[in-house]
Amino acid sequence: MPDGVIRPSMDQMRESVFACLGDLSGKSFLDIFTGSGIIALEAASRGASTIEAVENDPLKRKTLLQNVSIAPVRIQCRFMSAELYVQRARRFFDYIFLDPPFPYQYKWELMARIADSALVSDGSLVLLHRPRQDYQKEEIAGLIRQDSREYGRSIVDFFEKKFLHL
């Protein structure tokens, strides 16, 4: 585990989320606020073929690079803020997992930016791990909440990108 503040994803939550996702063979996966890289590693172990991990905290860099080195496929690590990564995005992912620090106040704004970015295509699934009390009632334009799963004091929301087909 890296130095600094880190909130490792709970084993039960991680196992349950990936059981919902099923086989990721040939799919692309983006892990934003990756921390130690455990979610990206899990995606790799489930067959994802293109994986990126985004982390801004320099204290986590060494540990993240060590951890992803054991993956069965290459995990591309990007060391920058989530906001900058989303702003510069040029390709879409089948799955995007966000696990921001619980005090992070801009998760819903970031979700809206993701919904309006090149990161998502029709059918992309965006998952947000958040504290139970941090709920957004309004829908995010372009993302439809398909499911929410509770894990102790936290929740993972599953949003799907939907384009209107005329």
Image: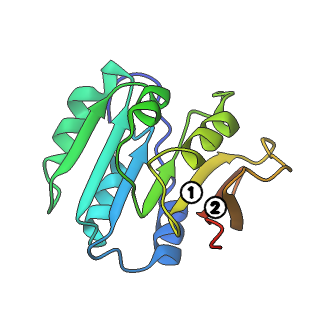
Estimate the x, y position of residue 133 in percent, counting from the top left: 81, 43
Q: Is residue 160 above or below residue 41?
A: below
Q: Residues within 10 Å of mark 2 (few under 14, many from 20)?
A: many
Q: In this orientation, which residue lies closer to the viewer: 129 or 90?
A: 90
Q: Is residue 80 above or below residue 31?
A: above
Q: Which tag is nearer the camera, tag 1 or tag 2?
A: 2
Q: Is residue 70 above or below residue 114?
A: below
Which quadrant holds the N terminus? top left
Q: Residue at x 48, y 52 (%)?
A: 97
Q: Residue 159's mark?
A: 2
Estimate the x, y position of residue 12 in percent, counting from the top left: 53, 64
Q: In this orientation, which residue lies closer to the viewer: 50 or 39?
A: 50
Estimate the x, y position of residue 65 in percent, counting from the top left: 19, 37
Q: Earlier in the sequence, mark 1 or mark 2?
A: 1
Q: Residue 127's mark?
A: 1
Asked whether the residues under the numbered discs 1 and 2 touch, taking CB atoms below 8 Å apart as contact, a structural biologist would say: yes
